Amino acid sequence: MKVESLREVKNNFSQVIEALSSTGPVVVTKNGKSAALLIPINEDTDLETLILSNSQRFWNLFDRAAGAKRTPLEALPDPSDDAAWRRLTRGKRRLKDSKSRPSQMPILRRGGS
């Protein structure tokens, strides 16, 4: 892994990008502290996985789901048994409008109706 200052990367950006496939990741420093990481990608790179792996929100959700109590498939009620499903989900926390969810844009209508 290569380490370069922000100034060096800015002055030689094209060369740094072209060399990524041979040099590997480049840590960009600002005032001597790590600030960014440049990594080589190609058409086979799974960008979604790469981005999610660096998301604290994703890992918090993952940890919460991994720690949740699981019900074996065989123990679940018949799909048509509404009463059984209500009993099973009673007391479960449901997502409601929260500040963590992006707000929705207002619906604009023509003609004032």
Image (cartoon, rainbow, N blue to C red):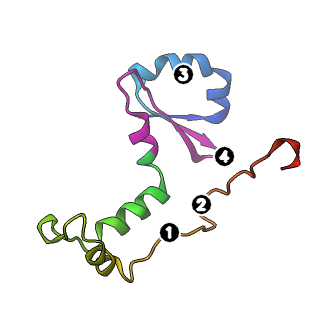
Label for residue 16? Answer: 3
Label 2–label 3 contact, CB within 8 A = no
Mark 1 and mark 4: Cα distance apart in space? 43 Å
Circle nearer the viewer, 3 or 4: 3
Secondary structure under tag 1 reads loop
Label for residue 95? Answer: 1
Mark 2 and mark 1: Cα distance apart in space? 10 Å
- Residue under label 2, please give it: 101
Mark 2 and mark 3: Cα distance apart in space? 38 Å
- Residue under label 4, please give it: 31
Residue lying furthest left in this view? 74
* Residue 61 locus on image (x, y percent): 42, 63
Residue 49, magenta (yes or no): yes
Mark 2 and mark 4: Cα distance apart in space? 35 Å
Residue type at the position of mark 2: Arg
3 or 4: tag closer to the N-terminus = 3
